[in-house]
Amino acid sequence: MMQVKPQDNLISLSQFLIEEQLKLPYATGGFTALMSHLVYAAKVVTREVRKAGLLDNILGSNSTQNVQGETQMKLDEYADRIFTNALSICGHLCVMASEEQEDLIHIPEGYKCGKYTIAIDPLDGSSNIDSNVSIGTIFSIHRRQDIEAKTPGTKEDLLQPGHKQRCAGYIIYGSSTMLVLSTGNGVVGFTLDPSCGEFLLSHPNMKMPESGSIYSVNEGNYNYWSPEFQNYIKHIKSIEDDKPRSARYIGSLVADFHRNLLKGGIFLYPNDTKSNKFPNGKLRLLYESAPMAFIAEQAGGMAVTIKGERILDLHPKELHERSTLIVGSKKDVEQFLNFI
């Protein structure tokens, strides 16, 4: 039987952040403390996800809809409450926004307002919860416009272009719980070790392959796409493209993106004519597209809209603004741009 050697040199997330903090002479420790509150909430959500099939109050949907007009799953609501409660009292945020809530989330009275903002999708891919498919949390952190201010933050503090993100990341609840993040200096991944309750550095320098053999798109909407987009999909499926791509679509952005980050490939979420409700695409710019684009670029990939605009250059005008998203390996996205 193969002997598994213990790894005694693993670095915890808190150790990693402290070491990164020491490299910056102007760092105050606020960002490290903010991340500790986020990680605490992630561990609580992990616990509930792991026993979702055993608890009736976690699986299934509520009779309510969220601000997006979507049926709200019980675990959606739970994750939103856990993350917003933990983060709002950390003392390092001036304002928050959640995909599940229509308006700004203000810092409770009596708690300090900090210099950061956070926009969070508490549970991405929630339609997959009851099917035991990987789901995740996505977050985006900015510095407020005036970092010296002590007053509550405003909508303008949140509505900043993606290239100004201080940090972006996601937590994937799959066969293991993993946190992937970037602070603008590459991408690192941490895996939760249940035996000690710590996120340990498991992927120190994550790089997306320059090209891949996988494409991820909901082909059920094929007939609603533009002719140019249909032709692109036909092309990458044909033998004319040297070797047909493999289709892999989970329907959870975090899961599809994470696989492509590790193995290479392209994820596509275009607009379509199926419904006039989402003429600019369905994904949320603040909570999904911008943070994933930040991670992709930091890992050597690319992220653009269906029109070829760089996602990180888009300046959101509303909290729940929608966008299209084409993200993945650099050469694959470049091929898409040439084709479109």
Image: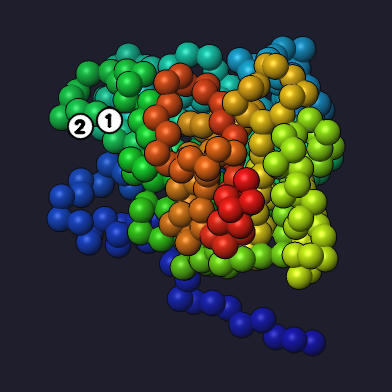
* Residue 163 in view of the camera: yes
Q: Nearer the viewer, residue 208 or 61?
A: 208
Q: Which colouring convention does the figure follow? A: rainbow
Residue pointed to by mark 2: 147
Q: Position of residue 273 (x, y in %)?
A: 74, 24
Residue pointed to by mark 1: 144
Separation of marks 1 and 2 at Cα, in angstroms = 6 Å
Tag 1–tag 2 contact (CB < 8 Å): yes
For label 2, the SS is loop
Q: Residue at x 36, y 18 (%)?
A: 155
Query: Up-down: is 66 above or below 23?
Result: above
For label 1, the SS is loop
Look at label 1 and name its amino acid: Arg
* Residue 51 in view of the camera: no
Q: Residue at x 54, y 77 (%)?
A: 7
Where the N terminus falls, by quadrant? bottom right
Q: Residue at x 36, y 43 (%)?
A: 163
Residue 326, quarter of the rendered image: top right
Query: Up-down: is 42 above or below 20?
Result: above
Look at label 2 and name its amino acid: Ile
Residue 132, label in figure: none
Determine whether, in the image, residue 1 is placed left or right of residue 277.
right
Residue 221, quarter of the rendered image: top right
Q: Residues within 10 Å of mark 2 (few under 14, many from 20)?
A: few
Q: How many marks?
A: 2
Q: Position of residue 267 (x, y in %)?
A: 66, 49
Q: Residue at x 58, y 22 (%)?
A: 100
Q: Residues within 10 Å of mark 1 (few under 14, many from 20)?
A: many
Determine whether, in the image, residue 88 is placed left or right of residue 144.
right
Q: Position of residue 238 (x, y in %)?
A: 82, 60
Query: Up-down: is 115 above or below 23?
Result: above
